[in-house]
Image (cartoon, coloured by chain):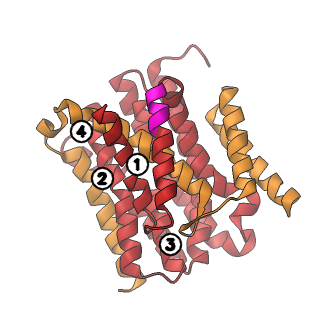
Amino acid sequence: MTLWWAIAAVCAGCYALKLAGLAAPRRVLDHPTVRRFAELVPVALLAALVAVQTFTHEGGLSFDPARVAGLGAAVVALLLRAPFLVVLAAAAVVTALARILLG
Amino acid sequence: MEDTTPRSAAVRDGLGVGLAVGLSGLAFGAAAVTAGLSVPQACVLSLLAFTGASQFALTGAAGAGGDLVAATLGALLLGGRNTLYGLRLADLLRVRGPRRLLAAHGVIDETTAVAMAQPTPEAARTGFVTTFASLYVTWNLTTLAGAYGTSFLGDPGVLGLDVVGPVAFLAILWPRLAGSAELRGLAAGAAAIALCATPFLPPGVPVLLSAAAVLVVLAR
């Protein structure tokens, strides 16, 4: 399997997965449990993505002080009700500064 | 800025998320080329796969010398959450025919979060389209720039760009957590499941597995 075939499979597969959700029959959606499931699932997945992208590296748990400092800055910005862009900028700047300070 | 209609607020949200998150395409382009992909390969992934976590998963695993079949499966498992987003969005978007084929390409974390955060269905549709358009254009342009510029940029971590992804997800999640202790519990449980599973499962699977926390909430 060459890299191009892997890329083609990922592109086609990701599109099919997206379309499958939008095109699912209505009666599937009309079930209250399915509805609630679909409401709750993004919360779980987003939280998991935050955790995995912050605290893991190449398939193992890892603690990157600079990245955690950036996430902390984002939490402070969110508590202060800062706009989205400010939250992202604060996190990136704090992460970059922490990397300089921590070597 | 405070006195806005739901639709103009949705445009603002969409542009904010789209432009800001789109910038992390710089990190993807750089990571992809560092992992051994060519510039066209990085760009094709951003144009046609257009779901960041899966793209990162494929290039990360391919770059680490991993098996390409496993890397592909990991990326697809990660893309499986977009199916669940699509189930949720189908109600809000109500698109049919060719428009559905186009809208499907935009069913990702960011567009779903912005659409679901809007107070009315019209605002949700506006938020979806604005986020999709601004994120698609920015993500692809910055993928190209990041891929070409890798030799000059070196490590995007120097600019703190690697933190943009998780922070964007956190900022999107925040308003929902603020209003509900149940959702905070769900988020904490899901994060714990994903972290505990990470050492034992291929990349992409722990995030999907975290959806099991939803079953606990549903069973209560």
Under mark 3, the amino acid is Thr
Task: Specify the label residue A18 is tagged with.
Answer: 2
How far across and down, in percent of the image, does residue B77 sit?
35, 62
- Determine if marks 1 and 2 fall on one subunit: no
Dividing the image into 4 quarters, which one contains the N terminus of chain A? bottom left
- Which of these two is toward me, A69 or B217? B217
10 Å crowding of disc 3: few (<14), some (14-19), many (20+): many
Q: Label 4 belongs to which residue?
A: B95
Q: Secondary structure at mark 4?
A: loop
Q: Residue furthest top?
A: B3
Dividing the image into 4 quarters, which one contains the C terminus of chain A? bottom right
Q: Label 3 belongs to which residue?
A: B59
Q: Which residues are magenta?
A: B181-186
Residue found 43% across the figure and 69% down from its top: B202
- The vertical placement of B137 against A78, above or below, is below
Mark positioned earlier in the residue sequence (3 or 4): 3
**Subunit of label 3:** B
